Image (spheres, rainbow, N blue to C red):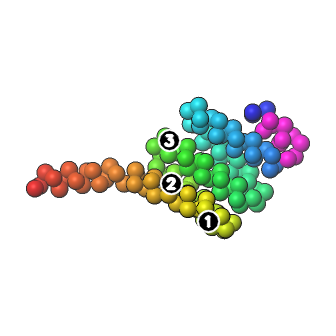
């Protein structure tokens, strides 16, 4: 699949190149190669941004967020989901915006869970 990315770059087809990078990121995430998937999704995101495709850029942000979530980088995942939600709002895709907002809520809950648990332990020891 990297070969396809390179070929699209060589022939000057940035949409197809970005799509190929995005698909490669999905494949890498599915086989648990998360570090590579993060890098590849960032590349797809950057290409979509360069060509001004806000909707596909939002999808790349969302896929990046899902990958970051998998590796427990919740703060970064929340940022990615927030960017995706903003872009989906700009492109008037309410369904995907709502899906991403649910993912953001889940990541936020997981990000805040250790703090809530620590607070519960502190309060519990004082009772």
Q: Which residue has dot 3 on it? A: 70
Left or right of 58? Residue 72 is left
Q: Which residues are magenta?
A: 4-13
SS class, disc 1 = helix
Q: Is residue 11 magenta?
A: yes
29 up-or-down from 50: above or below? above
Which mark sits nearer the N-terminus, 3 or 1? Answer: 3
Left or right of 116? Residue 125 is left
Residue at 75 percent across and 46 percent down: it is 19
Quarter of the C terminus within the rendering: bottom left
Residue 36 at least partly seen: no
Q: Which residue has dot 2 on it? A: 103
Q: Main secondary structure of the magenta part?
A: helix
Q: CA distance from mark 3 to mark 2?
A: 12 Å
Residue 9: x %, y % from top left: 83, 42
Residue 10 at least partly seen: yes
Mark 3 vs mark 2, foreground winner is 2
Q: CA distance from mark 1 to mark 2?
A: 14 Å
Q: CA distance from mark 3 to mark 1?
A: 25 Å
Q: Which residue has dot 1 on it? A: 94
Residue at 85 percent across and 47 percent down: it is 13
SS class, disc 2 = helix
């Amino acid at each position: 699949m990297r070969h396809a990315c390179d070929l699209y770059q060589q022939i000057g087809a940035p949409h197809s190149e970005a799509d190929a990078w995005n698909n490669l990121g999905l494949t890498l995430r599915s086989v648990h190669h998360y570090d590579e998937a993060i890098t590849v999704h960032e590349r797809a995101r950057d290409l979509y941004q360069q060509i001004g495709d806000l909707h596909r850029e939002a999808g790349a942000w969302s896929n990046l967020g899902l990958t970051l979530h998998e590796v427990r980088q919740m703060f970064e995942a929340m940022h990615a989901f927030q960017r995706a939600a903003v872009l989906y709002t700009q492109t008037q895709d309410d369904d995907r915006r709502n899906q991403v907002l649910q993912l953001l809520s889940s990541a936020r809950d997981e990000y805040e869970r250790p703090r809530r648990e620590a607070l519960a332990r502190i309060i519990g020891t004082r009772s």
